Image (cartoon, rainbow, N blue to C red):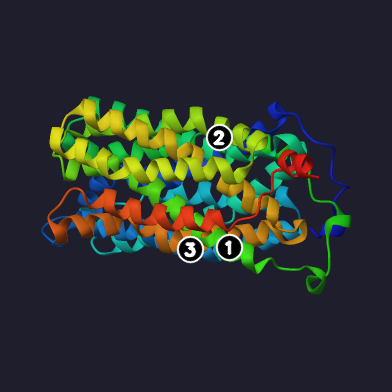
Amino acid sequence: MTIAAIAPAPAYLPLRKIAAVGVGNALEFYDFLTYSFFSIQIGHCFFPAEHFSNGLVWSLATFWIGFFARILGGIIIGRYGDRAGRKPAMMLSFSLMGFAITALALTPSYAQIGVAAPILLVLFRLLQGFALGGEVGPSTAYLIEAAPPNRRGLYVALQYATQDVAVLAAGLIGFALSSLLAPEALDDWGWRAAFLIGVAVVPVGLAVRRRLPETLGEADRQPGAAVQVPWRLVGLGLALLMSGTICAYVVDYMTTFAQDSLQMPANLAFGATIATGLCSVCFEPIGGMLSDRFGRRPVVLVAGVLLLVIAMPAFIVITRLRSVTALYGMTALLSVVQAFFVAPVLIALTEGLPKAIRSGALSILYAVSIAIFGGSAQLVVKALIDVTGSALAPGGYMTLALAIGVVAMVFMRETAPAVLARRR
């Protein structure tokens, strides 16, 4: 399908009608992130101790590998979204994710097929990454193009909010499975059940996405030479996305951190994931709405500075008290403040990109930053803990990333239409 066959872009869509974007986005991120929350169990299954010195490190490394495929997915599917339209690109990425997650869930263990098992695991993680790399750009471009100008912050905040619906769902399912199953059963098939629950939603997601109108009209296409690439925005955007993704994946690591460093049972550790998902889902739309009213820069800067102040103290409280209350409370606090930081960053970056290259450029920027920094965050944190012998390492790494993000936001231009209108 070429862009010439696309109908003119529709009028702005009411919030309730873009639920299909959210459903697909949530499911893709559920499938991709569930691996992280079951990384210990997956390590036992595919990297057993008798053959691998540290199964968790191998499992986390495989988690990271999937992020590099997101770059290729961003280039191919993201740019396809600029040529053929946002809708066909979203349909393609969703279909590929459905296949990859089904295959991964059904892959036999190392005990059954030997070294072929981790090889297949890596291949299916690569396909997952390719699919998800092509999801973020087209879906975020769709959200901002479907939104009235004064509600872009709220609409695009749904990109992160639906990602955290996935985190919340994964946490609830992980808590239920780890509470009901013995550790051996969780290692053997419990984590597979979590993936297959996501697979069951794939037909629904395909059906609802198929009914979406297209937001990219033929008039939106410009010759490549006519599009001015905003390189200043690209550089600052990479720094901000790096900062946000490191923070997000350090907080997402809390479930593994609680089991590996704090020696908590798996069912209690999954409560941290529930806290992260619930707080983020509730507060990211609020962050988007505040950025619509007051601007992207003020909201990001206030939240970023606050995170800088509380990140290390939060980990000090968790590691010294080593209680469920401390773990859940500090995870919730970090998640709430982070919600106000990450959503306006994505909004500002998406608004600043020309429409003709928005899907592809955003896909590539997001995939590169998250592959190098976000995807490696949990492996880096584990390595820092092992090398330093300090469970405070995640707080230090998060603080460094935040400092870079706050500095980058100081140099960003404001993009919120309401704020720009008041300045005229």
- The amino acid type of the residue labelled 3 equals Ala
Q: Residue 364's mark?
A: 1
Q: State yes or no: discs 3 and 1 in contact (Cβ < 8 Å).
A: no
Q: Residue 81 placed where, x, y %? A: 70, 56
Q: Nearer the viewer, mark 3 or mark 1?
A: 1
Query: Which quadrant of the rendered structure holds the C terminus?
Result: top right
Q: Is residue 12 left or right of residue 55?
A: right
The Cα–Cα distance between marks 3 and 1, rounded to whole angstroms, is: 11 Å
Looking at the image, residue 46 lies above or below residue 75: above
Q: Residue furthest front?
A: 423
Say which element carries label 1: helix
Q: Is residue 126 left or right of residue 354?
A: left
Asked if one can make out residue 135 in the rendered structure from this viewpoint, the answer is: no
The Cα–Cα distance between marks 2 and 3, rounded to whole angstroms, is: 30 Å
The residue shown at (36%, 47%) is 35
- First in sequence: mark 3 or mark 1? 3
The residue shown at (17%, 39%) is 319
Q: Is residue 276 left or right of residue 420?
A: left
How many other residues sit within 10 Å of disc 1, few (<14), some (14-19) or many (≥20)?
many
The residue shown at (15%, 52%) is 390
Query: Which quadrant of the rendered structure holds the N terminus?
Result: bottom right
Looking at the image, residue 318 lies above or below residue 93: above
Q: Nearer the viewer, mark 1 or mark 2?
A: 2
Q: Report which residue position mark 2 lands on.
A: 287
- The amino acid type of the residue labelled 2 equals Gly
Asked if one can make out residue 196 in the rendered structure from this viewpoint, the answer is: yes
Question: Dividing the picture into quarters, in which one does residue 295 lie?
Answer: top right
